Image (cartoon, grey):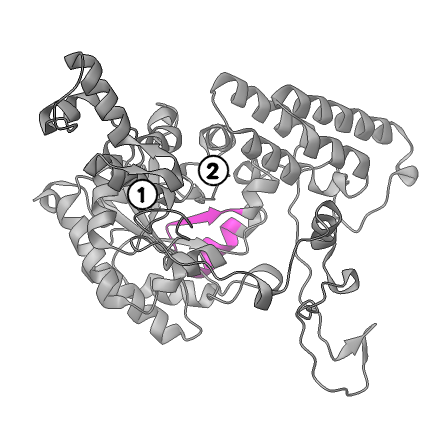
Amino acid sequence: MCSMTKPRGFEFWRSTLKGARYVVAPMVDQSELAWRLLSRRHGAELCYTPMLHAQVFVRDANYRRENLYSEVNQEDRPLIAQFCANDPEVFIQAALLAQDYCDAIDLNLGCPQMIAKRGHYGVFLQDEWDLLEKMIKLADEKLAVPITCKIRVFPEIEKTVKYAKVLEKAGCQLLTVHGRTKDQKGALTGIASWKHIKAVREAVNIPVFANGNIQHLSDVQRCMEETGVQGVMSAEGNLHNPALFEGCSPPVWEMAEEYLEVVEKHPPCSLSYVRAHIFKLWHHTLQIHQDLREELAKAKNVAGIAEVNRQLKQRCQEEMAKDESEWTRTDLPFPHWICQPYVRPPPKDPNTENGQKAPETKAVSVKRALEDSDGSNDSLSKNKQKKKARNPNKNFCPELKPKYIKCEQCGNPKGNKCVFSLCRGCCKRKAFKEVADCPGHGLRFKTKALKQCNSDTGGGQSNGKPNSQTVSTAVHDPL
């Protein structure tokens, strides 16, 4: 079995991962090859791919090529590929397709976003221990590379420790613990609990990485001392300062220029990824120079983004040339053009106002009220008001929206005129397999096959139906 020959636990961490301590987190659409290479130049010792969707990875060759196969680079090792999945068989199929391009496979059990809730993966699997045990055990048995996991904690330390032990027993060879719960996200992110991480580290016999509260190199050192972990992972801190693990805070334009050079050297890189990185790097400056924020959003290519970067650099250098007392003041520890973290403001206490206890009032929902059924603009968000301006007849009332009938196979909305009562993707596969037509989706496999057969035979069959062998050679796989 593979599990008997591949490195395990601490041997895996020391030999394959080279004792990595400074780790760049898996980030959706943000930890792509160019960013990983930049981070490695500035102290990162281990990187993860962005989270990959196992089911899509299995069925879509283009997705595999664009998100892993085309990014193979000898400088980009060691590398761990992360997947989200909720089916053991699908997960192992995806992992087998990926294992030759990375040093380990990671199962995402930490994503708290709504998309993970809808897809039933990430942190929303943290209570399904039997399923997770089956997935990890199967991966440990079948894969030629180790299986690792990234988790979030439960509010209770004891339950978190028990959870970690279940994963270790199933075959997990390295565990990353994000010290926040499922509900700590967005405006409620708050502080990560290093106590939970320390308790896990002391309870398991595999390497542990800590994630959470990492904004400077001093945080990395303090975290390792307080928790005893083998390594520390950074996400937000790394995005705002890719030189975090070097312990320095360079001018933003230096990091931005170097990143754009790497992008040009290692194409292709999605423009949306590049733009998102520049937005993060220049976050503090763009609060001041908001006109260039608009320009960055409208840039059509990497050259356009580089031009905005040049203008931001010029403005900051002009400000630097002034007397320090004339600099644009902010509440940041460094001038706004220096790489530094963005600290989310803590959630406001509804019972206080300007630091004073507010008079008691009835509790009100912190969410915006649902729009009135008449679609009044006063009750719509700014985004929906823009949509309303473009399309005055647009309806935002959930009760008045049409109810879509689901596809019988995948649950997506079915085509209204589909002869199979399926969505377009499922209909296309069925129509191709059965050599059938679906006018509702504009699919003509049967018609094309008949035409091809007629042209090959010079007039067609007497009964109007081609034999199956002729059809199979006449139709090409559209998928």
Write down the quadrant of residue 316 in the picture: top right
- Is the Cβ of the residue at disc 2 closer than 8 Å to that at disc 1? no
- Residue 386 in the image, given as x and y percentages of width and height: 73, 49
Q: Residue at x 47, y 43 (%)?
A: 28
The region drawn magenta spans: 220-235
330 is higher (above) or lower (below) than 30: below
- Residue 334 in the image, given as x and y percentages of width and height: 74, 43
On the question of residue 12 being in view, the answer is yes
Q: Quadrant of the C terminus?
A: top left
Write down the quadrant of residue 276 in the picture: top right
The residue pinned by badge 1 equals 427
Amino acid type, mark 2: Ser
Q: Is residue 341 left or right of residue 265?
A: right
Q: Secondary structure at mark 2?
A: loop
Q: Quadrant of the N terminus?
A: top left
Q: Secondary structure at mark 1?
A: helix
Q: Residue at x 81, y 82 (%)?
A: 358
Q: Residues within 10 Å of mark 2 (few under 14, many from 20)?
A: many
Q: Residue at x 64, y 60 (%)?
A: 396
Disc nearer the start of the sequence (2/1): 2
Q: Residues within 10 Å of mark 1 (few under 14, many from 20)?
A: many
Residue 221 among those drawn in magenta: yes
For discs 2 and 1, the disc positioned in front in the rendered view: 1
The residue pinned by badge 2 equals 31
- Residue 344 in the image, given as x and y percentages of width and height: 66, 57
3D distance between C-alphas at marks 2 and 1: 35 Å
Q: Residue at x 27, y 25 (%)?
A: 448
Q: Is residue 178 left or right of residue 97?
A: right
Amino acid type, mark 1: Cys
